[in-house]
Image: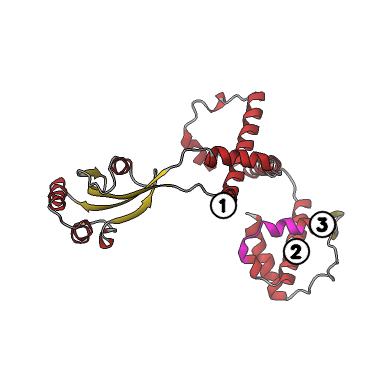
Amino acid sequence: MSLRKQLFPAIALVAATALSAPATAQDSPDPDTVMATVNGTDITLGHMIALRASLPAQYGQLPPEMLFDGILDQLVQQTLLMQNFEGELSRRNALVLDNERRAIFATEAIDRVMGGDLDEAEIQAAYDAQYASAEQETEYKAAHILVETEKTARDLIAQLDDGADFAALAREHSTGPSGSNGGDLGWFGPGVMVESFFDAVASLDTGEVSDPVQTQFGWHVIKLNDTRLKETPPLDEVRGEIEESLRQAAFDAHIAKLTAAASIDRNGADGIAPETINQTDLLEN
């Protein structure tokens, strides 16, 4: 059972018995301050804060004194149970403990690698490479009429050649959600539309109407209304994105360095069926 689940009865007990508030708060709390001692084992304020930080947000709705006493009771009870536990942990829980210890150390290592200050020159260089020095991306403003068959699409193109209004035909015939808006799709760049649709748009001149274009949604008649070069965002607007990218790159490089220097043998996994990891019964003693 998880700590979170175990805390529920302790919190409920506090609410039912209306335990008193903790001792007078200190002006400068010290996480090493001992809150309770159980058979010589100290429980500190730091232990309590760490447990509180792991709880779901819903616990923030409880009065502080109730949460304080509930957490302290929880830690006291857990300490008593741990001290009086006899024998060995079950195989399952021993492995869970191994995994949690591994994860905690890994998280601390990640924080050290990714949490340091970034050099402003490095940020500027990354911005220049990704934005300032990069070729400006073309954006397109287009409209379309989506129909079910190629024949219908060609009939609409013939009407447009005869002078019909594109927006009016889109409102009348298009099965797509933009039909009510005259087929207007607004501005978009690469990666937004499906590839065949975007390629057709990019091949048009402004004001030109495409031949029928098929996608998984049906047949499209597309009109390119305008093009523009996408504006380069200022550094401050994309700073967070760049910093995250640099931190991720630092982490990837650190992992690559550790991997290159390590002796890693995965041969033990050969021949093991992937679905075996679902067999929790294998952990039962």
In the rendered image, residue 257, in percent from the top left (x then y), is placed at 65, 28
Neighbourhood count class around disc 3 (C-alpha, 10 Å): few under 14, some 14–19, many 20 upward? some
Q: Would residue 207 be found to the left or right of residue 100 on screen? A: left
Q: Give, as a single range, the part of the protein colored magenta.
A: 48-58
Q: Secondary structure at mark 2?
A: helix
Q: Would residue 189 be found to the left or right of residue 200 on screen? A: right
Q: Which residue is mark 2?
A: 73
Q: Earlier in the sequence, mark 2 or mark 1?
A: 2
Q: Which residue is mark 3?
A: 31
Name the residue: 14% across, 47% down.
154
Q: Does residue 2 show up? A: yes
Q: Would residue 97 be found to the left or right of residue 266 on screen? A: right
Name the residue: 64% across, 70% down.
61
Seen as rendered, the residue at the extreme right is 40
In the rendered image, residue 39, in percent from the top left (x then y), is placed at 85, 56
- Does residue 122 belong to the magenta stretch? no
Q: CA distance from mark 2 to mark 1?
A: 47 Å
